[in-house]
Image (cartoon, helix red, strand yellow):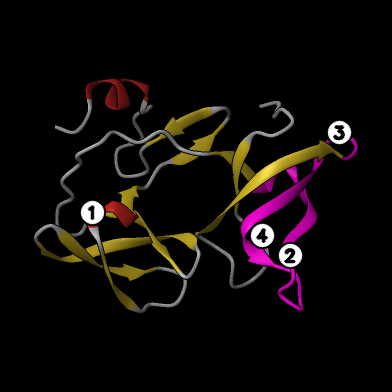
Amino acid sequence: MAFKLNDLVEICKKEEGFSGVYYTAILLAAVGRKRYLVRYENRFNEDGSRFLTEAVDSDEIRPSPPQPSGYNFAMAERVEAFVDFAWRVGTVIRKVDPNYYVKLDCNGKEHHCPFFKVRRHLEWQNGTWLSPATGVICQSLLLLGPS
């Protein structure tokens, strides 16, 4: 997928410790054919004085995923929870209406998350959103909303 200047994207670094962690960023420029310059919305430079800007590989970038509203997650469902300034892949382990407890893949810790900081986990593959649980292309799921 070709990204455009000022696109809102998510970055999942391929480095150890970043697997399944998606940081929101703004795309600033193309750097060659397979790299982009991005400015994170929730990561800061070393002294904390400004948002971190860096070049990332194109395979570390995905568009912001579309999300149906009003989704009700089930136990053991794969989700992404917004914890420590990033979307982190995990599993719903408990529901306390209307919120969730999510066990994060990146560190195995459980987090209590308000419902509005939990979203369906989708994978961006070959320019298409897929549900990893079913392998189904999510375009029709997103148009219809949750079942």
Label 1 – label 3 distance at C-alpha: 37 Å
* Image quarter in which the N terminus is found: top right
Determine if the magenta segment contains residue 11.
Answer: no
Which of marks 3 and 1 precedes in the sequence? 3
Q: Disc 4 designates what residue?
A: 14
Q: Residue furthest right?
A: 32
Q: Is residue 25 above or below residue 91?
A: above
Q: Which residue is mark 3?
A: 33
Q: Earlier in the sequence, mark 4 or mark 1?
A: 4
Residue matched to label 2: 50
- Mark before the other along the chain sequence, 4 or 3: 4
Residue drawn at the location 36% of the way across and 28% of the way down? 138
> Pointer 1 and pointer 3: residues touching (CB < 8 Å)?
no
Instruction: Check disc 4 and report its element: helix, strand or loop.
Output: loop
From the image, tell me which residue sits under label 1. 77
Residue flagged by tag 2: what amino acid is it?
Arg
The amino acid type found where label 3 is placed reads Arg
